[in-house]
Image (cartoon, grey):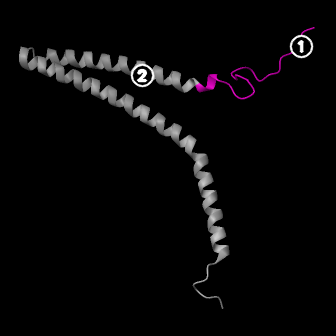
């Protein structure tokens, strides 16, 4: 009967193998999760810009109404100006993010093939 203090080599080898398999699986998932998380962060950033632009416009409109006594036109104008500027800013950022996302696909792969073409073989002309 083995003593309880003696190490079990088979258990350690099995644990090491399972740990290596787990780490390999996590390393393979990391790039896909990173791109997914980045896209989610970009979406939240664009949403925050939209909400922030509207709230800042409303705040400036309220200040204008409060000090110039032009109620409700300051808030209406501030809302429209804030919304317009927020949408303009979001479109610019979204176009920049889109260009960054499509830039790696334009580099091609190791064969020099750029992709994007037809997969049908070209016919020979006589």
- Crowding at label 1, few (<14), some or many (≥20) Cα neighbours within 10 Å? few
Q: Say whether residue 12 is magenta.
A: no
Q: Relative to the observer, which residue lies in front, 11 or 98?
A: 11
Furthest residue toward bottom: 1
Calculate the distance from the C-alpha at mark 2 to the C-alpha at mark 1: 46 Å
Disc 2 vs disc 1: Cβ atoms closer than 8 Å?
no
Q: Main secondary structure of the magenta part?
A: loop
Residue under the image location 44 percent in, 23 percent down: 94
SS at mark 1 in the image: loop
Screen quadrant of the C terminus:
top right
Instruction: Decide: is 5 above or below 115.
Output: below
Residue under the image location 12 percent in, 17 percent down: 64
* Residue 14 appears left or right of 74: right
- On the image, the x and y values in percent for residue 14 come to 65, 68
Give the residues in magenta.
104-126
Q: Relative to the observer, which residue lies in front, 110 or 92?
A: 110
- On the image, the x and y values in percent for residue 37 come to 47, 39
- Crowding at label 2, few (<14), some or many (≥20) Cα neighbours within 10 Å? some
Question: For mark 2, what is the residue?
Answer: 93
Q: Relative to the observer, which residue lies in front, 125 or 101?
A: 101
SS at mark 2 in the image: helix
Residue under the image location 32 percent in, 20 percent down: 86
Instruction: Decide: is 65 above or below 33.
Output: above
* Residue 91 appears left or right of 2: left
- On the image, the x and y values in percent for residue 100 come to 52, 24
Disc nearer the start of the sequence (2/1):
2
Question: For mark 1, what is the residue?
Answer: 124
- On the image, the x and y values in percent for residue 45 come to 38, 31
* Residue 76 appears left or right of 104: left
């Amino acid at each position: 009967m083995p003593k309880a203090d003696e190490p079990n080599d088979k258990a350690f080898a099995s644990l090491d193998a399972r740990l290596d398999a787990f780490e390999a699986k996590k390393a393979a998932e990391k790039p896909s999760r990173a791109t997914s998380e980045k896209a989610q962060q970009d979406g939240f950033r664009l949403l925050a810009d939209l909400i922030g632009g509207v709230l800042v416009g409303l705040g400036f409109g309220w200040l204008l109404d409060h000090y110039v006594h032009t109620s409700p036109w300051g808030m209406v104008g501030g809302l429209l100006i804030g919304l317009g500027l927020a949408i303009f800013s979001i479109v610019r950022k979204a176009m920049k993010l889109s260009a960054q996302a499509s830039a790696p696909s334009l580099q091609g792969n190791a064969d020099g093939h750029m992709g994007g073409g037809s997969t049908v073989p070209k016919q020979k002309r006589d």
